[in-house]
Amino acid sequence: RKEVEQDPGPFNVPEGATVAFNCTYSNSASQSFFWYRQDCRKEPKLLMSVYSSGNEDGRFTAQLNRASQYISLLIRDSKLSDSATYLCVVNRANSGYALNFGKGTSLLVTP
Amino acid sequence: DGGITQSPKYLFRKEGQNVTLSCEQNLNHDAMYWYRQDPGQGLRLIYYSQIVNDFQKGDIAEGYSVSREKKESFPLTVTSAQKNPTAFYLCASQTTFLSNQPQHFGDGTRLSIL
């Protein structure tokens, strides 16, 4: 089983739609969870950290379910500029501060 | 501005040649990392360092070497032993002062074979 698994997509949605991505992780001892955004041929950029109680940042909401070992990202009122690949990231519990990156879910928002 | 600087942006390697990718950060972060990304693939960890003068192999260290002589700098050498070096190389840094901190990335170096 891969450390972090995501549906690669692509998810094609119209502007204004709500879209949700899920991710599962294998190491129950993991403590740190993040969503990153990566534009084509660019470096990953932190979108948001994910906390146990769930957290929201504008149109973005992240949830963590430790019992099921999955993380979700909800994007409301999608914008054209949200088109990117979204990476689910989890710390490696036994390797200091190193992180495991999912392969990403591709989102295309269309007019 | 604080950040991570990678250079060069594009690099070409000849057969049998070693090349070195530069990564410098002025964020005062203790931990630094090197990743490789192939088209359509996720990031794979090459090497990481959590303190000056110490570093550990990641998942795909063969054919690569690093040094960490200064806190700000973590250069990666792609040796001739790395037979398939063409990829997007990303350097990241992270504070270890608090737990559960994200990594921040430089804008990458694209390496190709001549």
Image (spheres, grey):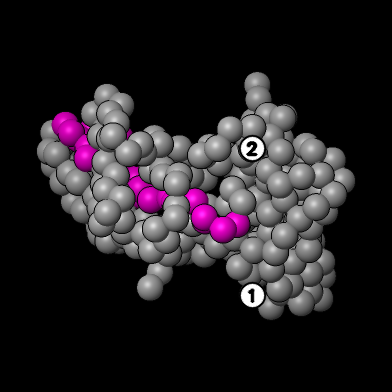
Secondary structure beneath dot 1 equals loop
Q: Is residue B50 visible?
A: yes
The answer to whether A63 is drawn above or below residue B113 in the figure is: above
Q: Mark 1: few, some, or many residues within 10 Å (few <14, many ≥20)? A: few
Q: What chain does badge 1 belong to?
A: B
Residue at image location 81% in from the left, 44% down from the top: B52
Q: Is residue A29 above or below residue B97?
A: below
Spot occupied by residue A19 in the image (x, y as percentages of width and height): 17, 44
Which residue is tagged 1? B84
User: How far separated are the C-alphas under marks 1 and 2?
Assistant: 33 Å
Q: Amino acid at mark 1?
A: Asn
Q: Nearer the viewer, residue A42 or B29?
A: B29
Where residue B6 appears, as percent x and y from the top left, is: 69, 43
Specify the segment rendered in magenta.
A74-95
Amino acid type assigned to the residue bearing label 2 in the image: Thr
Q: Is residue A40 visible to us here?
A: no
Q: How many marks?
A: 2
Instruction: Determine which quarter of the picture holds residue A9.
Output: bottom left
**Which residue corresponds to the image point at 64% horizontal and 37% vertical from the top-left?**
B96
The image quadrant that residue B112 belongs to is bottom right
Chain ID, mark 2: B
Mark 2 neighbour density, 10 Å: few (under 14) some (14–19) many (20 or more): some
Query: Residue at left 79%, top 38%?
Result: B71
Residue in the image at 78% along x and 37% along y = B72
Q: Are marks 1 and 2 in contact (CB under 8 Å)?
A: no
Provide the secondary structure element on which disc 2 rests.
loop
Question: Is A93 a magenta residue?
Answer: yes
Picture disc at residue B96: 2
Task: Estimate the x, y position of residue A3 in percent, counting from the top left.
Answer: 42, 64
* Residue B69 magenta-highlighted: no
Q: Which mark is residue A99?
A: none
